[in-house]
Image (cartoon, rainbow, N blue to C red):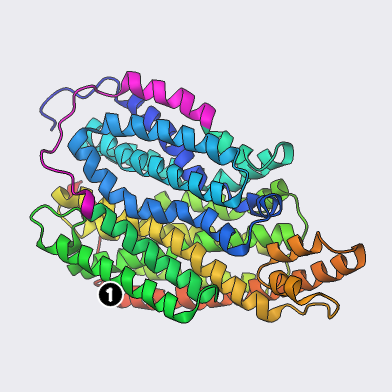
């Protein structure tokens, strides 16, 4: 039992932190439907588009753990309010960015603000709700807001783009922050227990520099944008920095990221599921948004509506996963959900989106539900494998897995798409070689080049681009299906048989 009376304002505090958390999650997915209009307005290259989308989850992945540690030292309230202010300012900058580079820079600051908000939200829920049942309920509500926010992101993005310019998808954060920041300032406790000690900023920088170097090398390598020696050099540098970070963590008495947790096979299985499932979800949504708008010429709002089944079903996955894991054991639920999502991807790869019928929305719903069950199962695996005192460290590790999965998913899907697309496209012979080289990079580039041509040439080029993108889409979904099915087998082998949830023993 808690030693003192629970905070009478605790449900209001929960409301305030959930509102603070919402724009951060929305920003993960709201851009997916804005990509085509943003690409054409800013004349952004395929690589620039990937960085605009990707810099946010990647930096968040590097910053979540350091910011979580910092908020333990300084207090959640101060870090949260700083994060909210920064997020509002960066949203305004992003909305009015005049070039791709300016938008990438604004997204860097959005990630910085977001990484201050995310750990504080969890920290405040942990501190405000001391009674276990209430805390489980509060975390459940928080998880639903997270899933629902990511789910409606493309829909809100689409609705805004129908009425306004692409910058509106960022500007919407500002009024939300103007309500949330004063509410948090009033409601959150002024006095908090903090952890003494220095904040290891050097370790934080190592983690971020190492991760971004590795991802940059992967992108530059796949996109063949840089000569091979440069790619190898950057990749080696990134791996060396991350190795140094890992060694520091393993030696430290109070490490920033508790890597000793990785000695639990179940936690490793959980992390693999978190990275692959969140990566697949982000990558599939991004590919779909482009297919629907570039190839099927749907408006952003129509694209958002088409994607509702995948998102609505994903929002339901959490509670379903908890129930099923209690009934049938984590091992079966985790591997079976991955196997079914692989099958759904395989079906979508063969489907004709021009005539979706009832089966395509159904397959999208199955995919959203099973990937979401996989994500929740990964959370159950990680949290169930450790004692309560390490909950914070495990939570940080898991959140990093999600963000890293989203970032890498978008990076790999984007690179893979670009590679397959440039091989699949059959360009008209009359196209000058410089324009041909640009048009073959991504479907966005095809449209940018088509804008510079006469009507007949433009129509022929766009048709070639659409055909190539549909082939690319199909190859991409088939490959993802194989990866996820393989993971299902790996998870089945790693997770110990019939691992019931520790939760059931409390009742």
* Label 1 CA crowd tier, 10 Å (few <14, some 14–19, many 20+): some
Task: Indicate whether 49 appears above or below 20.
Answer: below
Give left or right: position of 95 versus 482.
Answer: right
Looking at the image, residue 71 lies above or below residue 181 = below
Q: Residue at x 48, y 50 (%)?
A: 316
Q: Is residue 194 magenta?
A: yes
Which residue carries the number 1 mark? 494
Where residue 264 appears, x then y in whole percent? 19, 67
Q: Is residue 102 left or right of residue 326?
A: right
Q: Answer whether residue 504 is magenta in the image.
A: no
Image point (27%, 34%), residue name: 124
* Number of numbered labels in the structure image: 1
Q: Residue furthest right?
A: 456
- Confirm whether residue 148 shows in the render: no
Q: Is residue 158 left or right of residue 477?
A: right
Across and down, in percent, residue 10 comes to 29, 25
Residue for point 33% across, 75% down: 236
- Please tell me which residue is depicted at 76% across the width and 64% down the height of the picture: 449
130 lies left or right of 314:
left
Q: Which of 295/446 is in front?
A: 446
- The N terminus, quarter of image: top left
SS for callout 1 = helix
- State which region is magenta: 174-202
């Amino acid at each position: 039992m808690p030693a003192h009376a629970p905070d009478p304002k605790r449900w209001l505090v929960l409301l305030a932190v959930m509102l603070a958390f919402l724009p951060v999650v929305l920003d993960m997915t709201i851009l997916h439907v804005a990509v085509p209009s943003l690409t054409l307005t800013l004349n952004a290259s395929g690589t620039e588009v990937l960085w605009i989308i990707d810099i946010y989850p990647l930096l968040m992945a590097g910053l979540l753990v350091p910011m979580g540690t910092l908020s333990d030292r300084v207090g959640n309230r101060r870090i949260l309010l700083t994060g909210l202010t920064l997020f509002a300012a960066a949203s305004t900058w992003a909305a009015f960015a005049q070039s791709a580079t300016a938008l990438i820079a604004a997204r860097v600051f959005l990630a910085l603000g977001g990484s201050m908000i995310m750990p504080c939200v969890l920290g405040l829920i942990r501190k405000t709700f001391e009674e276990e049942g209430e805390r489980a309920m509060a975390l459940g509500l928080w998880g639903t807001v997270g899933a629902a926010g990511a789910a409606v992101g493309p829909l809100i993005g689409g609705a805004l783009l129908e009425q306004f310019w692409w910058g509106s998808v960022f500007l919407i954060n500002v009024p939300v922050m103007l309500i949330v920041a004063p509410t948090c300032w009033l409601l959150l406790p002024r006095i908090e227990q903090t952890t003494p000690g220095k904040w290891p900023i050097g370790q934080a920088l190592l983690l971020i520099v190492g991760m971004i170097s590795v991802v940059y090398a992967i992108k530059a390598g796949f996109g063949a944008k840089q000569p091979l020696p440069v790619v190898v050099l950057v990749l080696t540098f990134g791996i060396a920095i991350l190795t140094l970070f890992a060694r520091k963590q393993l030696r430290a008495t109070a490490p920033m990221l508790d890597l000793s947790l990785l000695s639990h096979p179940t936690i490793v299985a959980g992390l693999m599921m978190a990275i692959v499932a969140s990566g697949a979800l982000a990558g599939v949504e991004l590919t779909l948004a482009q297919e629907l708008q570039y190839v099927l010429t749907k408006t952003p709002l129509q694209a958002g509506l088409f994607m509702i089944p995948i998102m609505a079903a994903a929002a339901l996955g959490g509670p379903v996963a908890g129930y099923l894991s209690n009934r049938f054991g984590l091992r079966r639920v985790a591997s079976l959900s991955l196997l079914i999502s692989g099958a759904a991807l395989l079906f979508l790869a063969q489907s004709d989106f021009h005539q979706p019928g009832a089966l395509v929305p159904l397959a999208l719903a199955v995919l959203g539900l099973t990937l979401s069950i996989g994500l929740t199962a990964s959370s159950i695996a990680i949290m169930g494998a450790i004692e309560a005192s390490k909950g914070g460290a495990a939570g940080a590790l898991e959140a990093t897995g999600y963000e890293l999965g989203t970032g890498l998913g978008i990076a790999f899907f984007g690179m893979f798409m670009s590679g397959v697309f440039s091989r699949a496209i059959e360009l008209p012979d009359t196209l000058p070689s410089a324009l041909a080289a640009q048009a073959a990079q991504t479907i966005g580039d095809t449209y940018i080049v088509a804008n510079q041509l006469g009507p007949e040439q433009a129509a022929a080029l766009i048709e070639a681009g659409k055909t190539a993108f549909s082939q690319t889409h199909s190859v991409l979904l088939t490959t993802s299906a194989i990866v996820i099915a393989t993971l299902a087998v790996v998870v089945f082998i790693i997770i110990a048989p019939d691992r019931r949830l520790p939760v059931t023993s409390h009742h």
